[in-house]
Amino acid sequence: MIRKLTQRKFVKFFGISLGGNFVVLGLTMVTSVILARALGPDNKGNFTLLNSTIMMAISMFALKVEFSGAYFRKKTSFDELTSNAILIAIVSGPIAALIATIGVALFYDRMYQEIPWKLIFITLSMIPMYLFALNMRSMLNADYDIPRSVLVRLSRPAILCISLSTVVLLGTVTLENAVKCAFLGIAGMLIVSIVMVYRSGFRLFKVDKALLKPMTLFGLKTHLGQLLTYLEYRFDIFLVAYFLTPREVGIYSIALTLGEVLWRIPNVANKVLLSRLAKEGDRRSATLTARLNSLIFAFTAACMMPIFFLTKWIILVLFGEEFLDAWPVVIVLLPGVLAISISKTLTPNLIMQGRAWTYSLSIFCAVVVMIILDVFLIPAYGILGAGIGASVAYIVSSSIVLVVVVWNNEIPLRSYFDFIAEIKPFLKARGDAA
């Protein structure tokens, strides 16, 4: 009976997360269209570079507690776990902002020269706020409070989209105003995250000193994987900015936005499955992971086909002819994006088995491959070369994760892709009813 209730809760939360991700996708697409149409390729590229700077700083220098929160939730109270996450954010956020400032100063002449320092400082000030909000959202995920976590997730793109739309209506869309809208989005997310954590039960700031060290060490193990994951997904933005111009960065960002539409469902599985697997035994979690991967991979592959055929039309209608060079990049990204859906679904199984280093190793190999390919391909083929490098890197990391998970769980490889076996009971029930 308990298992059935747990399964129903999992399905419910999966649906909530999936719906939330589709809303985020819609808001992200609208925002991308507004920025592309209003700013053009050059300033769209500058905005993308600033946004990527925030994400890079958080990924490289700030310790998020997404995985460690889920791992240690059953060992401490929600108040103590959340207090630890707050303390970690207070310490690591300013450090990340400071190091990011040094990095921007070093590469200013090569990559940021068209962006005023005023906008750079506004951008850097967002880093501690964003990290704090992310840590609060991680605590909601750790407490299996998926609905409130989704609300936090929605707040930033919703506020950004609304504020940008207002600026458009007022006819004052500039790079500076776009950056200010981004600031409002992160500040709003911070406020929403605090409210949601309070409503989820946080009342007393009480650091669990005994847990702080192991929580931090576990976070450091997974932090390397998260850092490498961001490098795999977004470091090519900086390489494009280094070798090419803001215009190419803007066009390449549109290609990434369209290609990564397919990541939404695997991302949902990653967030919800992590908390669910923490409550399961090894064999049960392995079986659940295999079954879910077969369904998600099949669905992702089916969704890839219309994107493949309609990308050129979508770019022309939504973003305009100036961004049409993104079309071939999307095409070469699709095989890698399909492959990475495997890694996103299987990674929680690795984490819950205490194999964070294996996950990190797979991403490290992918990043090395991507950087080597990009250094040779971007100068020769421009953003198409960056797309090829990213796609190959995605395939490399997913292949390694798949091999390790299959080997450790001793479940046949075909079980991870046997979509027909998963839908047979449903088809049989429909047949019997008919």
Image: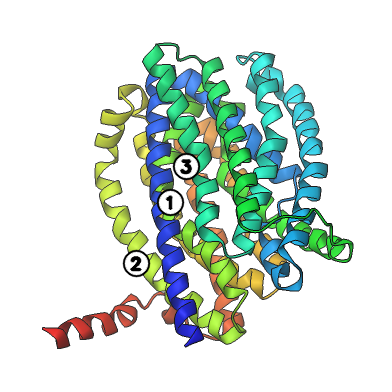
Secondary element under disc 1, as helix, strand or loop, is helix
Asked whether 402 or 293 is in front, the reply is 293
Residue at image x 55%, y 79%? 285
Q: How many labels does the image show?
A: 3
Q: Which of marks 3 and 2 is nearer the N terminus?
A: 2
- As measured in the structure, the alpha-carbon distance from the residue carrying label 1 to the one carrying label 2 is 21 Å
Q: Residue 20 carries which label?
A: 1
Q: Distance between the residues labelled 3 and 1?
A: 28 Å
User: Residue 383, image x and y in percent?
Assistant: 47, 34
Left or right: 350 with respect to 311?
right
View extreme (left): residue: 434
- From the viewer's perspective, tell me whether residue 220 is left or right of residue 330: right
Please, is residue 407 above or below residue 28 in the view? below
Q: Which circle, 1 or 2, is nearer the viewer?
A: 1
Residue flagged by tag 3: what amino acid is it? Gly
Asked where in the image residue 213 lies, by quadrant, the reply is bottom right
Q: Which amino acid does label 2 sit on?
A: Ala
Q: Which mark is residue 65?
A: none
Image coordinates for residue 93, horizontal then vertical, percent: 76, 40
For label 3, the residue is 387
> Which mark identifies residue 298?
2
Q: Which of 280 and 331 is in front in this view?
A: 280
Dividing the picture into quadrants, the one containing residue 312 is top left
